[in-house]
Image (cartoon, helix red, strand yellow):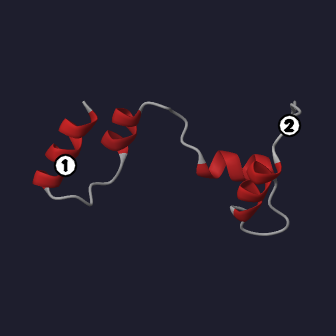
Amino acid sequence: MASKTVNLSEEAYKRLREWKISDDESFSSVIVRVLPKSRDLKKLLEDAEPDLTEEEAEKLKKDIE
């Protein structure tokens, strides 16, 4: 697998490290596990399991648009 070098600030490194489940988990695995594949918030919300009431969902949708 190809790899890339990424420079992180100390703060970014600490935050990323906090997301690790175990010492054996790689930073790449953390990023793939935590970050969504898409930056499209509307699509993310549509794909998410609904835990909101219909009224809450409509309000959230209006706030986003």
Query: At numbered mark 1, what does the secondary structure look like: helix, strand or loop?
Result: helix
Instruction: Using a 10 Å C-alpha cutoff, classify the residue at mark 2 as few (fewer than 14 neighbours), some (14 to 19) or many (20 or more).
Output: few
Q: Residue furthest left?
A: 55
Q: Amino acid at mark 2?
A: Asn
Question: Vertically, is 42 above or below 19?
Answer: above
Question: Vertically, is 16 above or below 45?
Answer: below
* Residue 57: assigned label: 1
Q: Is residue 52 left or right of residue 11?
A: left
Residue occupying image coordinates x 74% and y 49%: 12
Number of labels in the image equals 2
From the viewer's side, name the closer residue of 26 and 9: 9
Q: Quadrant of residue 24?
A: bottom right
Query: At numbered mark 2, what does the secondary structure look like: helix, strand or loop?
Result: loop
The mark lying in front, picked from 2 and 1, is 2
Residue occupying image coordinates x 68% and y 61%: 19
Instruction: Using a 10 Å C-alpha cutoff, classify the residue at mark 1 as few (fewer than 14 neighbours), some (14 to 19) or many (20 or more).
Output: some
Question: Vertically, is 38 above or below 59?
Answer: above
- Position in image of residue 14 (x %, y %): 77, 58
Q: Quadrant of residue 3?
A: top right
- Position in image of residue 1 (x %, y %): 86, 34
- Position in image of residue 64 (x %, y %): 28, 36
Q: Amino acid at mark 1?
A: Ala
Q: Quadrant of residue 51?
A: bottom left
From the viewer's side, name the closer residue of 33 and 41: 41
Q: Which residue is tagged 2?
A: 7
Looking at marks 2 and 1 on the same chain, the residue that comes earlier in the sequence is marked by 2
CB within 8 Å, label 2 to label 1: no
- Position in image of residue 27 (x %, y %): 79, 51
Placement of the C terminus among the 4 image quadrants: top left
Residue occupying image coordinates x 12% and y 52%: 54
Q: Is residue 63 left or right of residue 12?
A: left
Gap in Å between the C-alphas at discs 2 and 1? 38 Å
